[in-house]
Amino acid sequence: MRHICNCVLVLAIFCGLMPSALAQGYIPTCEADRTEAKNFKPTTVVGRRPTLGLVLGGGGARGAAEVGVLKVLVKEGIKFDYVVGTSIGAVVGGFYCLGATPEQMEKEFESGAIMRHFMTVPLTFRIVIAPILILPRLFGSKQYDGLYGGNNFRKYLVGNMTAHNQQIETMKPTFAAVSLNIIDGKPYMIRTGNLGYAMQASSAVPALRKPVELDGKLFCDGGVVCNLPVKQCRELGADVVIAVNIDEPFGPVPLTDMRKVGSMTDRMVTWGLYDLDVPQSMLADVTIHPDVAGISLITTSKKDAKRGVLAGEKAATEALPLIRKKLAEAGITYSAVSKSD
């Protein structure tokens, strides 16, 4: 089924038979699988400039590590043609495409502003008062399910944008936010429309945040199916892809670890994301995986934010030799930023 989906998309693009979803800026896609990833072979670019894509995965407050990666890549002078993000990756990627500097984003993470606006009141308090929040339904309210609405988060994200630069289609590099339409069960790349709504939709964690309705679709966090959207970046047109994975690494743990309260839930979430990330990572030319172990998805701690940024800088710096090699092999040139800059 995934291969059929790919073929239909390719035919639509190259034959000019654009389905209505594409015309509206919602590009249907599919999750990657291991067979597809094993059989993948990069195309040889002839007669045109090869393109470079950046993929930013989901991971909540661990998005600070993506900012750290960007600090290194920007200093290196690397520029991207495509940026595709899921969840917090869509937020970081959206800001990057608008021209925000990594240092500006670093301040937002370290101040805790991003996560405080993501959850406007503490999660424990919201859970305690959840029964009260159900009361409006008894009087006919038809709101979508979720502890947080997400509108304050969107307003915070777009607070300093003009009406023009809120539109995704005006952004350079080309940007896409990945989100799951829970009505038809398919992931989509949101390519046009209001950036704030796209970032809100891509990061609407099921049950935690209410889904976002856009043009008859009901979107929730894209990390459910495409947490590291490398395949999606290639579908947009990237020839070479650098991916940033901010999920915790999955490996063997002592049996005693599984006796802790909540350990099974934590373990299964970690495994589920790992299982989604593996085939996507196989499709990337370079995957940067900062050490974010122990950083909570919803922390507002300045210490955690600083550790995330430093972890991203360290992982990106270690990956630079491979990045330079891959870009040189692909014929992608760039001008390194001088130290004085």
Image (tube, helix red, strand yellow):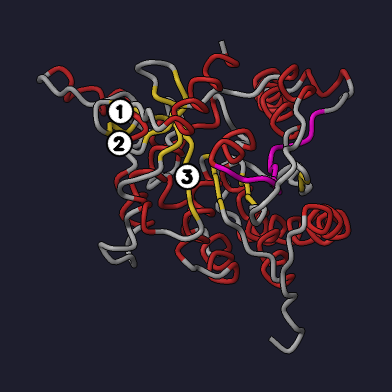
Task: Identify residue for label 1.
Answer: 20
Check disc 2 and report the residue beneath it. 24
- Could you say which is closer to the camera, residue 69 or residue 20? 20
Magenta range = 237-250
Mark 3 to mark 2 CA distance (whole Å): 13 Å
Q: Are marks 3 and 1 in contact (CB under 8 Å)?
A: no
Seen as rendered, the residue at the extreme top is 1
Q: Secondary structure at mark 3?
A: strand
Q: Is residue 12 above or below residue 104?
A: above
- Evaluate if marks 2 and 1 touch, with contact meaning CB atoms under 8 Å apart: yes
Residue 73 in percent (x, y) is at 71, 64
Q: Is 249 or 76 nearer to us in this picture?
A: 76
For marks 2 and 1, give the CA distance.
6 Å
Q: Which residue is mark 3?
A: 176
> What secondary structure is the stretch in magenta mostly built from?
loop
Res. 261 in view: no
Rendered residue at 63%/50% (across/down): 54
Q: Secondary structure at mark 1?
A: helix
Residue 193 is left or right of residue 142, and the answer is right
Instruction: Please identify the quarter of the rendering in which residue 319 is found.
Output: bottom right
